[in-house]
Image: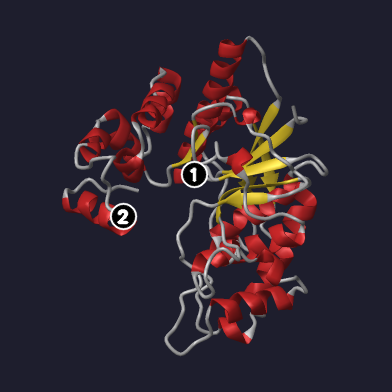
Amino acid sequence: MSKPFNILAVAQRGRLSYEAVIFAASLKHAVEQRAEQTGSEGRKVSLYIAEPQPGERWDQDPRIDDDELRDLLISLGAQIIPFESRVFGQSYPYGNKIEALLALPKDEPFVFFDTDTLFLDDPGRIAFDFQRPSASMKREGTWPEIQLYGPGYDATWGALYDKFGLDFASSLDMSQPREYWQRYLYFNAGWFFGACPQRFGQLFLDYARAIRDDPPPELVCQSLDPWLDQVALPLVIHALGGGRPGPELDGLDGEISCHWRVLPLLYAREPDPVIEVLETIAAPNKIKKVIKRYEPIKRMIYQRRGQKVRALFDRNDLPRKEQKIRNIIKRNNLWMR
């Protein structure tokens, strides 16, 4: 069994703070359930919720402004830690996950998760090789968007690897055809892990800032908002000796964790056990009275609109494109975020 590791998520006032409660409650529930089943506490996992601090990169104070919610997170096992937004902040909130890494203890293995993640089982069961970082493959070919007369995938990604002195060829999946997006190292930044958050975070910050401020000419037609974190992430992972996740990580985005993203999509797409976990951990009054303050949670979970969304779809025959799922939900006036 591997040594203990830290779990990191980022929360601030508004939606993310309510998601963080669901995140922390599901982690606590999953760990306790596994311990009860096995009669063992298993591997120690510490939960850190990183909170951006007010400063020149925020128009308003981004900190969680609900003391009862803060106390609830702590009671669920979270340590709330501050971090400074020195590069991104309000202009690019996805950069929070980059700068928050620098607030974690040095040389302690970490796994980052977005707050819109539900734990179905103890993540301590996962056989992480922290010396070989990786990230979620639950992604679509969202970047780059190849233009008719512009550079292709080879030229675009190759320019980024060249910019940072990385070996491009060794990052490729040679089982995929050239100029097909899955040939190129690309992740969803919903979860990723590494051996040292300070080293990982500093490299992530350096690469993301360099891409934003001085992109290679091949990126002239490409949007970096909101994709900057997912453009820099594969470069960081490759530079640190990592790559695509192996089968030992299949429980992430599987039987151990669910990156649900938006509640209507969760109810539309996920299997019954995921819904059961969500509604079980949301049921205790100490949790319900806090998270129902957020209108989408109140309506989707407690007023049962999520079940109305669920009735619109056959989980065994879902539309292939997410946009079609969204459109069906919107046509039925059930979309909320």
Mark in front: 2 vs 1: 2
Residue that mark 2 sits on: 320
Q: Assess disc 2: are there few (<14), some (14-19) or many (≥20) residues with their C-alpha within 10 Å of its C-alpha.
A: few
Residue 252 visible? The answer is: yes
Q: Position of residue 177 (x, y in %)?
A: 52, 70
Apparent side of residue 27 relative to residue 205 in the rendered image (left or right): left
Apparent side of residue 261 relative to residue 128 in the rendered image (left or right): left
Apparent side of residue 131 relative to residue 128 in the rendered image (left or right): right
Distance from disc 2 to disc 1, alpha carbons, whole Å, reads: 28 Å
The local secondary structure at tag 1 comes to helix
Q: Is residue 152 above or below residue 197?
A: below
Q: Position of residue 332 (x, y in %)?
A: 16, 48
Q: Is residue 167 above or below residue 196?
A: below
Farthest right residue in view: 107
Type of the residue with mark 1:
Leu
Type of the residue with mark 2:
Arg
Q: Position of residue 77 (x, y in %)?
A: 62, 25
Residue that mark 1 sits on: 16
- Contact check, label 2 and label 1, Cβ < 8 Å: no
Q: Is residue 14 above or below residue 283?
A: below
Q: Which mark is residue 134?
A: none
Of residue 70 and residue 311, the one placed in the foreground of this image is: 311
Q: Assess disc 1: are there few (<14), some (14-19) or many (≥20) residues with their C-alpha within 10 Å of its C-alpha.
A: some
* Residue at 55%, 39% in the rendered image: 252
Q: Quadrant of residue 79?
A: top right
Q: Position of residue 82 (x, y in %)?
A: 68, 44
Farthest left residue in view: 332
Q: Quadrant of residue 233?
A: bottom right
